[in-house]
Amino acid sequence: MQNMYHEAIQTLKSGGVLLYPSDTIWGLGCDVRNDQAIDKILELKNRPASKGLIVLISKMEQLSEYVEQVPDLAWDLVEFAEDPLTIIYPKGKNVSPSLLGPDGSIAIRLVKDEFCKGLIYRYQRGIVSTSANLSGDASPINFETVAVSIKEQVDYILQNPNPKKGSGKPSKIVKLGLGGEYALIRG
């Protein structure tokens, strides 16, 4: 398994785009600081830059690396969430500007799936995540449903040798404010 991660990590370090099974669906990923790789993902998906991308992290401590100030409510939400939960934090940092919303916010999900978590942990940095589909198409729940054009244009495909069925749907998304306010963006 170490070898499999090795190729994926080399791809991320060299500015490549990865096709991988996330904790929810099949995703496209790259380094959170690499503008060219992020542009390539948007191009592969035929997706406008105005639609946000998510950052995946493997441990809670990484939040402070990418968020200026973590609202208190976030710690409980992340710790007790049973299903994959993406949280939009008020002010992001240390990532490509294209990962930030118009208001400077950043969407981050702590993954609990061991395979995906293993990738991020070994990379020692958050990775970009977006569904591996053409804009407007259904999110791919397995490798077979990923468009051939995407498979042909990514730099590396990371397969889980012991695939488990993910949730098959995108994560829930909650937006938090520093004053305790919150809004459900996607349920």
Image (cartoon, rainbow, N blue to C red):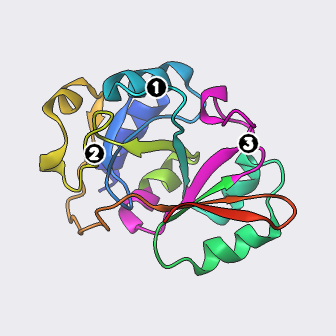
Identify the residue at image location x=57%, y=48%.
124
Q: Is residue 92 left or right of residue 121?
A: right
Amino acid residing under circle 1: Pro
Secondary structure beneath dot 1 equals loop
Q: What numbered label is drawn on residue 48?
A: 1
Q: Quadrant of the N terminus?
A: bottom left
Q: Is residue 149 visible?
A: yes
Amino acid residing under circle 2: Leu
Task: Tell me whether the residue at label 3 lies in contact with that at label 2, contact meaning CB atoms closer than 8 angstroms.
Answer: no
Q: Is residue 100 left or right of residue 82?
A: right
Give the label, 3 or 1, closer to the camera. Answer: 1
Give the label, 2 or 1, closer to the camera. Answer: 1
Q: To which quarter of the image does residue 118 belong?
A: bottom left
Q: Is residue 16 visible?
A: no
- Is residue 115 found inside the magenta-colored segment of the image? yes
Percent position of residue 38, x then y: 49, 27
Secondary structure beneath dot 2 equals loop
Dot 1, how many residues are within 10 Å of its Cα: few (below 14), some (14-19), or many (20+)?
A: few
Residue tagged 3? 92
In whole angstroms, how far apart are the C-alphas of marks 3 and 2?
28 Å
Ranked by sequence position, the earlier of labels 3 and 1 is: 1
Q: To which quarter of the image does residue 94 belong?
A: top right
Identify the residue at image location x=75%, y=39%.
93
Percent position of residue 76, x then y: 70, 77
Above-or-below relation of 69 to 48: below
Amino acid residing under circle 3: Gly
Dot 2, how many residues are within 10 Å of its Cα: few (below 14), some (14-19), or many (20+)?
A: some
Q: What numbered label is drawn on residue 158?
A: 2
In whole angstroms, how far apart are the C-alphas of marks 2 and 1?
25 Å
Which range is magenta? 89-118
